[in-house]
Image (cartoon, helix red, strand yellow):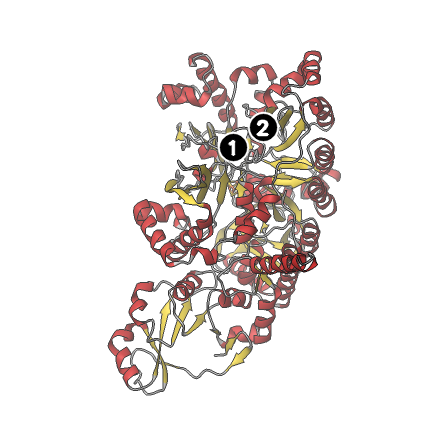
Amino acid sequence: MYRYDEFDHQFVQDRVSQFRTQVERHLGGQLTEEEFRPLRLMNGLYLQLHAYMLRVAIPYGTLSARQMRTLADIAETYDRGYGHFTTRQNIQYNWLRLRDVPDILQELADVEMHAIQTSGNCIRNITADPFSGVAADEVEDPRPTAELLRQWSSLHPEFSFLPRKFKIAVTGCRDDRAAIAVHDIGIRVVRNEAGEIGYEVWVGGGQGRTPMIAKKIRAFLPKKALLAYLEAMMRVYNLYGRRDNKYKARIKILVHEVGIEEYARRVEEEFAALDASAIAADAEEIVRIEAYFEPPAYDRLPARAAALENAKKNDPAFANWVSINVGAHKAPGYAIATVSLKPIGGVPGDATTDQMRLLADIAERFSLDELRVTIEQNIVLPQVRQDDLYAVWKLLAAVDLATANAGLITDIISCPGLDYCSLATARSIPVAQAISRRFADAERQRLIGPLAIKISGCINACGHHHVGHIGILGLEKGGEESYQITLGGDPTENAAIGERLGPGLTADQTVDTIERLVAVYLAKRKPGETFVAAYRRLGHDHFKEALNAAA
Amino acid sequence: MPLLDRTGAITDPWVRLDETAPLAARQVIVPLTRLEPDGAAVLTSGAKLGVAVGGDTGFELLRPWLDRLSLIAINFPSFTDGRGFSLARQLRVRGFKGELRAHGYLIADQLGFALATGFDTVEIDDSLAARQPVAEWLAAAKTISLSYQRDYAGPCNILEARRAARAQQNTRVAQTEPAK
Amino acid sequence: MARQDALYILTANDLLEGDVVFWSGAGWARDHRAAQIARNADETTALDAIGAAEKAARRIIDPYRVEVTLGADGTPVPVRFRERLRTLGPTVRLDLGKQAALRANSLL
Ligand code: SF4
């Protein structure tokens, strides 16, 4: 993985000092609250319902054991012994004091991490496929591109005061695990007919109040044109994006209002005026970054480990976990293991200090020192030898991290909601917990198969409810929490926005309705057909009966 | 109204005209609405011409005047409105060589960004200068000593620094290799 | 004195500590039961002014008024669920937030 050189180190160091003086200048009155606010947000520091929250970037979701240990240390020293992994591959601490934040940033900087641009109207943490570099079906590892973009977007002088926040995701696969269709800019590494590698560029996707699927702006962008092209895209947005209404300020609204053709025309005009070679990183720089992501020296192993097969035979619980949480690795004899942060009845995405430390130990011993954070709020051990899986699983089980539910109905995405978030209109975690308990039975979960439930505590949609196979949006109606169900959303290469099922429900009704939706699906599915596939085939109306029974 | 550049406070040789003031001075900044009617007269009088625009001013309006303007003053209605940074960069990319001046409401922490996107000077109002004196602006601009964006007029560029470091290493390697 | 039906208290977060605070009449209290209650329009206006002044003095951030009713013991209880949560803590972690101390003292 990428390692900072002296310049990267100096840069984050400068940033820590800058924030320290900004805090002092705010206390001294040189910066008013209104002036300090966007500056602290650009460093990931929010005020939440009960306290300050700090969001730390995990660029493209990649972490080393040492970094994970520092995240645990921070949780222990400055917070309440846990952290929350988010749908944008960040970690959030919920109980911080402003006075401690400069010191926390220093601890992060010491392990090559930061909180730069994890909030604010700027380019946010660059996210990527959590299986980057190990997925079997990859055109190219997208992380060198993501790292280039991390650097390029950091404290960008022109794009730090945009109309609104800006999210970029990168994938190197046809199978989209980075949800590029619902990002402000989505980038897919592709190969053209001549065999050259370049980028397919998408723009104007997003969730929130007005969910939209991104539109393709370039089918093939040569690699060396990337930074200049992004500069042109960002400039057109910065100049023309709406600033009169915060709910219409995202790039998706600009693209929607002027049309993709007109937006593209302005971008191409701007791009033509730029000297792409003066903006691009030179070839040696790209090679330098790529070298950090070279595949490690894998042991030469048979494609299937006998030890794994034996362990599966002797331990059905382990076999179940392997069949659900373990995926194919590009290197023979290796596997990608997903560690679920969704124990039955738990808080989705939360990990305790002990769990983080254990994950760090496991990564060091068994996963070539690598961890990934997924947009599903889980952790991935991307480089595990198949014959080590049993040992890994046993260690995970000891700290409640061996839940076999990756991609199943209890692998629920949930934003913090009203339990923590000051913008929330309803709680989301308790709904996730209730659904998780209702479907706790492992056999039943397996029978239901892949089903993504995603819950947001308000229209901002941090819980990605628009792209949940079943989405749940928490609202406030007449002072009460009310939940709106959507069906058929999909964040992948078949991206779709979920369609609303009916009027708002109470939390209890919501859980009951989901049970009935599942019953409708089970009754009508064809063999092997997933929930979302059945939904597409049968149509929305087929599922309405589940709701009617709730009333 | 204090005016500063990357070295500190400077005196302002320019006279800002409103919609009706006579074109008397030798260096005048006219509002955008006066550019077409009065611009040519200012130039023929031998005076230098500047124009005050908003961040939302389309670059196209300024294009015909680019090589005749000696100064473009771009207004920031609020420090959170970053359009002026893009307009400045757009003007520089299209070859504008005169002075770019930011006015309106920027804060000290943005001086570095303003310089990097092509501004030469920043005009701040008295109440802001009382809270954030010029020294604070200069200090704020220096806190970040490096930048990742090539082709911007920022502080030490990391990509160029890496390139230089590589070149130096290559020379060193070349020097230690025995001559044939 | 102008009359009003609703009762209000003033809340904010401590600038440096970040935790939830309530205006007691003499300073900022951590316990909402110590909050000063505005019972008429003049008192309400006065609370707003205190919030603005305290924010300008950089002691707290994000001050705003919260509508309350009076509990059996005469102490204020926020009307909105969100505001009640701020006096307690997350419902999914009863060991955290203000409720932890209340629970420890068998007050909850
Ligand atoms: S969706 Fe709403 S409630 Fe949930 S984290 Fe985002 S802003 Fe908060």
Q: Which mark is residue A138?
A: 1
Q: Residue furthest left?
A: B37
Q: Residue at x 56, y 76 (%)?
A: B7
Q: Which residue is mark 2?
A: A330
Contact check, label 1 and label 2, Cβ < 8 Å: yes
Q: Residue at x 65, y 23 (%)?
A: A333
Compared to residue B39, the image places residue A39 above or below, namely above
Residue nearer the viewer, B111 or C43: B111
**Spot occupied by residue A462 in the image (x, y as percentages of width and height):** 51, 40
Location of residue A36 in the rendering, given as x and y in whole percent from the top left corner: 57, 61
Q: Secondary structure at mark 1?
A: loop
Residue A11 relative to residue A215: left or right: right
Q: Could you tell me which quadrant the C terminus of chain B lies in?
A: bottom right
- Quadrant of the rendered structure where residue A307 is? top right
Q: Amino acid at mark 1?
A: Glu
Would you place residue B89 above or below residue A449 in this image? Answer: below
